[in-house]
Structure formats: C-alpha cells, structure tokens
Image (cartoon, helix red, strand yellow):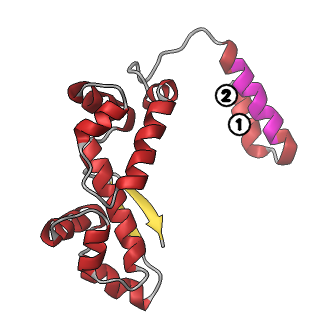
Amino acid sequence: MLPKLKLMLESEGYKRYLLLLEILFELSKCEDYELLNKEIMPYTIISKNKTRLENIFTYVEHHYDKEIDIEGVAKLANLTLPAFCNFFKKATQITFTEFVNRYRINKACLLMAQDRSISECSYQCGFNNVTYFNRMFKKYTGKTPSEFIRNYSHNKVNVDLKVEKETKAKISF
C-alpha cells in the first residue's frame, strides 16, 4: 500500500484520483484494524435523533428573543429534564444553556452590524441583563460588544466564537 501512496503523490489529475480509490478499496477489505475512538460518535447520536434535535433547534430559532424554559423544551423533546440535559450534551457536546447563549450572541452580532445599540441587541436577543449579555459576548467572541461595534464599523470583522478552552469556530460577517 505504501508504494501506491508514494505513486499517488507523484501522479496528477484523474490518475491520482483512481489511485486514491484503489487505496480506499484495499482499506475497506482489510480486517486488521483498530478503532481510534471506541465511544459512540455524536454523528450517530444526531442521525438517530435528527427529528428531535430539529424540533429543539427550530424552537430556539423561533423563541431565542424570549425567556426559554428548559423544562418546556425537555417536554417538547418528550424527555424528562435530566434525560434531556444528558441527551443534548451527548448530541452536541455542549449544554443546552450554552447552545442558547451562543445562538443569541450570534444574533446579537447580526443586529450590531445593523447599527443597533448594545442594550437594544441584548434585549432583542433574549438577555434580560446587559451586564450578563456583555459577559457572554466577551466569553464567546473574545471581544466586548463595544470593541465589536468599533471593529465592525471600520471594516469587515471575523468573530472567533470560543467553543471550548482551545478550540475556536470562525464566523465571518
């Protein structure tokens, strides 16, 4: 298999593609392998519960500007509150509250790009407290709302949404 890999690096066009397919075919027949991740993959969880997650995401999309009762969302998903929290965390790798906050901050960024005030964006996105909004905004974007507006007004800005401690997802406006 190693010679084919080397040959693939030297090839161009459709020959390279055909060599890749040959290698993949050989790998698919191989019975000597070791799984690198033996845990259930989130994709598997998502595909099994696609409708349930779609209902949750749609609910948040339509109600992000109001107070969202997590128990009501759990009922919408036909789960008890603890089961819902476990299900959502396994499926998305984040808590439901974190998901809602990220969604709201994303919406706030879009509103700020339309020259809305910070407090107006905060309340229109479902935050009842501007101080909490400022804290969440800084947590997920790495900037204060004022810095975001200042940067955005000067030029197009990239917002880094902090996913975990060191992982970041880039969103462009």
Instruction: From the top left corner, tell me how far across and down residue 130 is, in percent.
Output: 17, 72
Q: Quadrant of residue 158?
A: bottom left
Q: Residue at x 44, y 26 (%)?
A: 45
Q: Quadrant of the N terminus?
A: top right
Along the line of sight, which residue is nearer the eye, 160 or 69? 69
Q: Is residue 25 magenta?
A: yes
Q: Secondary structure at mark 1?
A: helix
Residue 137 image point, x, y percent = 25, 67
User: Which of 54 and 145 lies nearest the eye of the viewer?
Assistant: 54
**Amino acid carrying mark 2 in the image:** Leu
Q: Outermost residue, right direction?
A: 14
**How many numbered marks have been drawn onto this rendered protein structure?**
2
State the image coordinates of residue 141 (x, y, percent, origin top left): 30, 66
Q: Amino acid at mark 1?
A: Lys
- Rendering coords of residue 42 (x, y %): 43, 30
How crowded pointer 1 is (Cα within 10 Å; few <14, some 14-19, many 20+) is rated as: few
Magenta residue span: 16-26
Circle on res. 2: 2
Residue on which disc 1 sits: 6
